[in-house]
Image (cartoon, rainbow, N blue to C red):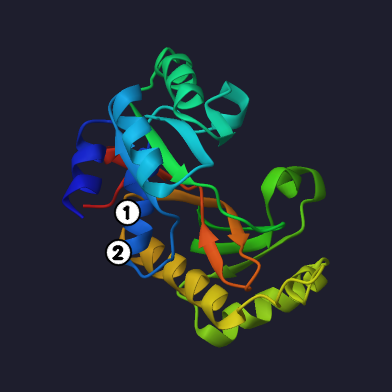
């Protein structure tokens, strides 16, 4: 992608979240409905189109860990709330725009990602996601590229694999769709040496079992670190 190369040349540490998810979508990974907007009034217009409630986030390539920065506002139910949160988010250092997202229903959260290991190269990661990722540390890895069979095996290897089954009246996870996400992440890492890390957290599971990426980080390597 030209904008990946451009970001590396300019020394940017990462793509902004909107750009990251557009990359995922280009590889067939399902993403939530969202819009990148410059200000509060445009955010209100986007929220009306999606329908309330919505999520509002600060966007910028240097805003990589939004929760710690207070750069996310959830469950906004009216234009007044969107305007107020827009003013707050735009004041965060490094914020150069706003992302308006649909509120995705679903109680289960997974994580999919990629690291670039010095010995093995790009490795795909899968496990329990959301705020529990670092606390529970229930993740497994595979060297990329992956086959669908590899991805399905990874799902059985996490300790909390039962989360993929029917849950509180919600359907079992669509494992084929989830496998498609993992295979695609491996393909992205294999194709773009400029990418240092991918973190899709959370991948929310809708009540019908379908997975969707609602947050994503694509961190980049420096130009000097990328082989010519």
Residue 80 at x, y percent in the picture? 47, 22
Give the residue pinned by disc 2.
26
Are the residues flagged by discs 1 and 2 in contact, CB closer than 8 Å? yes
Residue nearest the viewer, comparing 3 with 107: 107
Q: Which mark is residue 86?
A: none
In the picture, measured across the screen, residue 113 lies left or right of residue 184, that is right
Q: Residue at 30% of width from left, 64% of height from top?
A: 26
**Distance from Cα at disc 1 to Cα at disc 2:** 6 Å
Q: Residue at 35% of width from left, 62% of height from top?
A: 25
Task: Say few, some or many: other residues with alpha carbon within 10 Å of mark 1 (under 14 / 14 to 19 / 20 or more).
Answer: some
In the picture, measured across the screen, residue 110 lies left or right of residue 36, that is right
Residue nearest the viewer, comparing 223 with 171: 171
Residue nearest the viewer, comparing 116 with 108: 108
Give the residue pinned by disc 1.
22
The quadrant where residue 77 appears: top right
Decide: is 178 above or below 116. below
Number of numbered discs on residues: 2
């Amino acid at each position: 992608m030209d904008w990946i190369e451009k970001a590396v040349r300019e020394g940017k540490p990462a793509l902004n979240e909107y750009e990251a998810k557009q990359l995922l979508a280009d590889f067939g990974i399902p993403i939530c409905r969202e819009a990148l907007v410059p200000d509060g009034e445009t955010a209100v217009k986007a929220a009306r189109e999606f329908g309330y409630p919505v999520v509002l986030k600060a966007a910028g390539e240097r805003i990589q860990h939004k929760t710690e920065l207070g750069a996310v506002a959830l469950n906004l139910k009216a234009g007044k709330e969107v305007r107020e949160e827009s003013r707050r988010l735009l004041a965060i250092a490094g914020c150069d725009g706003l992302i308006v997202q649909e509120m995705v229903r679903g109680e289960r959260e997974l994580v999919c990602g990629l690291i670039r290991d010095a010995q093995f190269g790009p490795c795909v990661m899968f496990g329990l996601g959301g705020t529990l990722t670092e606390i529970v540390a229930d993740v497994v890895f595979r060297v990329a590229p992956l086959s669908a069979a590899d991805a399905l095996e990874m799902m059985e290897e996490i300790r909390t694999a039962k989360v993929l089954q029917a849950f509180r009246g919600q359907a079992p996870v669509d494992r084929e769709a989830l496998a498609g996400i993992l295979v695609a992440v491996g393909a992205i890492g294999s194709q773009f040496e400029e990418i240092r890390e991918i973190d899709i957290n959370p991948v929310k599971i809708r009540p019908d079992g379908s997975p969707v990426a609602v947050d994503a980080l694509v961190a980049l390597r420096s130009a000097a670190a990328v082989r010519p």
